[in-house]
Image (cartoon, grey):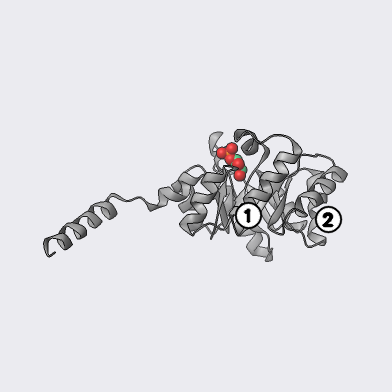
Amino acid sequence: MKFFIDTANLDQIKEAQDLGVLDGVTTNPSLMAKEGITGAENILQHYRDICEAVEGDVSAEVIATDYEGMVKQGEELAALNPQIVVKLPMIAAGVKACKYFSDKGIKTNVTLVFSVGQALLAAKAGATYVSPFLGRLDDISTDGLNLIKEIRLVYDNYGFKTQILAASIRNTMHVINCAKIGSDVMTGPLSSITGLLKHPLTDSGLAQFLADYAKGN
Ligand code: G3P
């Protein structure tokens, strides 16, 4: 299972990278704005900085909502660094642009996916990643995890190569449940990764080991 961090915060990206378990980064326009990164040039530079900080795939989202605009922006993003994955919204123009980029061998991430039908379309268009938003479905009392389960089933039925990227992950249980049902990737905040470290028996066990070692020295 790949671990991506879902942030545009460089310090958090570096902290996750430093832990040695990070496989990539996802961002979106809201996450960029949260870090105060605005304006096309600053955003492009921030993507360059993120690519320098990590080794894996970095999803960079287009803002255009028409096909031509998506192709233009996606090509500009892809030219920044081979790590860039062009992130496209699940609308007709996004599906069409996804097909365009996959035919050219450029990696894609189809985002804002909330149904199996949408995930099927993304796979048909050759998406590298499909991003079902687990947390946002849970927010409206819909079973987000079940969506990922159903996408897994459909993709396995036909051997689609598109990787399921569980997005809108909010906590460690989301990560663990996604791992149980075979999500290829998860993307979440730093806390959803570092939270996996925690267990009180680990802490008390280590304290005991150190205390016992100290007795003999
Ligand atoms: O990866 C998608 C993500 O950024 C959305 O997360 O927490 O805003 O629903 P959230």
| Label 2 residue near ligand 1, CB within 8 Å | no
Q: Which residue is mark 1?
A: 52
Amino acid, disc 1:
Glu
State the SS at label 1: helix
Q: Is residue 181 above or below residue 90?
A: below
Q: Is mark 1 within 8 Å of ligand 1?
A: no
Q: Can you give x and y, in whole percent of width and height, for residue 186 in the image?
A: 55, 52
Relative to 182, say whether 46 is above or below. Answer: above
Q: On the image, which quarter does residue 214 sit in?
A: bottom left
Q: Residue 159 at x, y = what percent? A: 67, 66
Q: Nearer the viewer, mark 1 or mark 2?
A: 1
Q: Give residue 112's mark.
A: none
Q: Quadrant of the C terminus?
A: bottom left
Q: Is there CB contact under 8 Å for labels 1 and 2?
A: no
Mark pair 1, 2: CA separation: 27 Å
Element at label 2: helix
Total marks in image: 2
Say which mark, if any, is on residue 100: 2
Specify the quarter for ligand 1: top right
Q: Position of residue 81 (x, y in %)?
A: 72, 56
Going 63% across and 50% down the picture, which residue do you hit? 50
Residue farthest to the left, as pictured? 215
